[in-house]
Image (cartoon, helix red, strand yellow):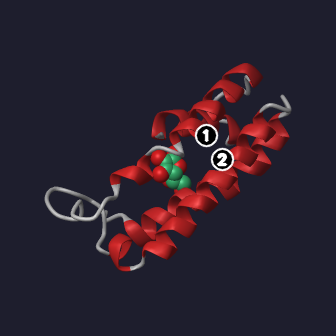
């Protein structure tokens, strides 16, 4: 996730040249991957070597809402990437990154 989202971030922040094809491909991978983590957070998976905070299981509705917000934002990010316009990617990247950060702040230990 970090690798593919990171490539979009590099383009959105001017650290890498904008390449519409690369942006669209990476955004599609992000959309696909955005659906995957949630099935792993089953009851009982809160123990052992994990960065998952107990809040995931204490407030599953909040966790689910955060996951859905991220999934919605990366769909918008992919749509923006597919316009082939760097400014659209830039505009969509910040809100998507906020949903990563928001969930990590609340639900992932440092
Ligand atoms: C990334 C990455 C995250 C998010 C977050 C956004 O590239 O690995 O977790 O962006 O840092 O604030």
Q: Which residue is mark 1?
A: 31
User: Considering depth in this image, is 57 or 91 the residue closer to the camera?
Assistant: 57
78 to the left or right of 105? right
- Which residue is depicted at the point 79% across and 50% down? 91
- Judged from this view, the residue extending furthest toward the left is 48
Residue 30 percent location from the top left of the image: 57, 38
The mark total stands at: 2
At x 73% / y 22%, what residue is drawn?
Answer: 19
Quadrant of image for the C terminus: bottom left
Q: Establish if 93 lies above or below 53.
A: above
The residue beneath circle 2 is 74
Q: Earlier in the sequence, mark 2 or mark 1?
A: 1
Q: Position of residue 94 (x, y in %)?
A: 68, 54
* Whether the residue under disc 1 has CB within 8 Å of ligand 1: no
Percent across and percent down for residue 17 are 70, 26
Question: How many residues crowd mark 2 within 10 Å: few (<14), some (14–19), many (20+)?
Answer: many
Q: Nearer the viewer, residue 98 or 66?
A: 66
């Amino acid at each position: 996730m970090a690798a593919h989202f990171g490539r979009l971030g590099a383009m959105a922040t001017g650290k890498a040249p904008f390449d519409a094809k690369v942006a669209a491909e990476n955004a599609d991978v992000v959309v696909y991957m955005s659906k995957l983590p949630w099935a792993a957070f089953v009851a009982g998976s809160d123990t052992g070597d994990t960065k998952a905070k107990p809040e995931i299981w204490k407030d599953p509705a909040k966790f689910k809402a955060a996951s859905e917000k991220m999934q919605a934002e990366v769909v918008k990010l992919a749509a923006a990437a597919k316009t082939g316009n760097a400014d659209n990617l830039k505009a969509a990247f910040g809100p998507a990154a906020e949903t990563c950060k928001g969930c990590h702040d609340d639900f992932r230990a440092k």
